[in-house]
Amino acid sequence: MNAHEKFRPYEFIFILLAIIIYVVRRLIGIANDFDYDIGQRAEIVIPHEVIWADLASYDQIINNIFPTIAAAVLFTAAWAIFHFFVFPAIKQKSFDTTTIVLWVSVIVLALLGSFVYGYFKLYWRFRYDEQWNEIGFMVYSLYRKLHVLTNTIAVLILIAFYEVVAQLCYYSAELYEKQQEAKHKILSNFIWIVSVFGITFFSLFGKVANLIVGLNGLMVGIFQLLLITALHFFFFKIVIPYFAKINYSVQKELVVPFLGLFTYTLLSVILYLLWHKIASRGFFFGFFILPHLLGFATALVRWLFFEEKKQLLSKVFQKSAELDTLRSQINPHFLFNALNTLYAVALKEEAEKTSNGIQKLGDMMRFMLHENHQERIPLSKEIAYLENFIEIQQMRLDESHEIEIRVNIQQLDHEIYIAPMLLNPFVENAFKHGISFRKPSWIYITLTFDAQKLYFKVHNSLHPKNENDTEKQSGIGLENVQKRLELIYPQRHTLEIQQSEQDYFVSLTLSLGIGQ
């Protein structure tokens, strides 16, 4: 089970509790502000009858509690649908009717939540006379059609921002599970802690209105975003690479970020001391400290992931070079000539079964030498190799053995391209572990596909080999194909393996394109 699959049940409960805490806190806060304003003004100059006459159109339930709770429910539903259904479909590149309907439902829920809150929500403020003396209250609404549209867009942006953070959390945890390196553990824990703390802090002290609209306006927000992007590339291209080139006596990945952050923070403080007289603290934080922190943090995360990816690609290229070296040690012309000679001898001796087996073996070797090195091959060639392998395996079986082999391969009506040798390792594993000449055995192989996905299933009986058996498999082939799937089809495949004492089941689903 992946990291995000383990976390998701707790994630929904955590987010739900955070929203409930936020809504309750806001409702209590608004009610306290209402009581405070009325109590303070009633004690000063404004008569009770004037206050209640001015506030006659304001109802706490209709104009405060209902729109707040309704908007929270609708926004939560929009987030849940997008997070648990729409985004996973986007990752799988599944854009069917169901996904489109769910997409539309997210937008409609966000729009409806913004409308309900804006339409029913009322506010109050003081009325003044010409001398600016408080003489009563005034109830007003901020409902505007443009506000509903902009708030809907803001809610969708917040949902998308949460998804980015969530995927970063999932990815960091899965990266540690795969690589088991200390830096990945530190990074994963840091991201999780910051994310949980940020949501908790906001539910206890934050305001959605400030988060959506901001204090400095839309143009200022766009400027800050551009500044963060520029600083991100500055840290990623210049600062972090500079410190990464230095040799340290301790673990580099721990020293680089701290030295880089310390140096740049020192420069930032010096710069601030030079201009603090012309910039307020809020301005300095919003336009200097916060963008630099975000720019550095995102650059650091990208650097770590980039370096990890580069190291992984280096290992892949190294293995590829080793494979090319092994291939170069085999003279394909000698092998083909030898097979052709054996094929001619078999025909001369009228050994039809033997000649067919030699011909299929030659086709398989031709596939391994000419097709296996390509990035993508037609599925028809992969199927041909698979069928040749199965037929050669069946040649050693006869009717005296209680062995059942069923192969169901869907006919191709259009060409599909996949990476080579992704299917046969599972079939080879089935024949090595699923066939016994002393006990009843069976192997069921199914290959189907639709416009978006390929479905491959292998189900076989299980007969463990003894230690001296020459066909006992170490499992390297299956481990190899799992790594290749992670590299070639990241987030675009599902591999499920189930094993019991009697049987072994493999189900592989690939997201694919037609003619690609």
Image (cartoon, rainbow, N blue to C red):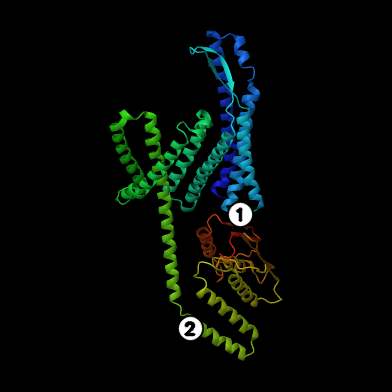
Residue 39 visible in the picture: yes
Residue 409, picture quadrant: bottom right
Element class at badge 1:
loop
Residue nearer the viewer, 317 or 376:
376
Q: Residues within 10 Å of mark 1 (few under 14, many from 20)?
A: some
Distance between mark 2 and mark 1 Cα atoms? 47 Å
Where residue 334 is drawn, which disc sits there?
2
Element class at badge 2:
helix
Residue 182 visible in the picture: no
Residue nearer the viewer, 264 or 339:
264
Residue nearer the viewer, 265 or 40:
40
Q: Percent position (x, y) of residue 51?
A: 59, 13
Image point (31%, 52%), residue name: 245
Q: Percent position (x, y) of residue 20?
A: 59, 31
Name, please, the residue furthest toward the front: 130
Q: Percent position (x, y) of residue 394?
A: 65, 75
Q: Percent position (x, y) of residue 207?
A: 52, 30
Quadrant where the C terminus lies? bottom right
Say which of marks 2 and 1 sits in front: 1
Lower position in the chain sequence, tag 2 or tag 1 = 1
Where residue 94 is drawn, which disc sits there?
1
Q: Say which amino acid is labelled 2.
A: Phe
Residue nearer the viewer, 371 or 91:
91
Q: Say which amino acid is labelled 1.
A: Ser
Q: Residues within 10 Å of mark 2 (few under 14, many from 20)?
A: few
Q: Is residue 190 left or right of residue 423?
A: left
Q: Is residue 231 left or right of residue 370?
A: left
Residue 121, picture quadrant: top right
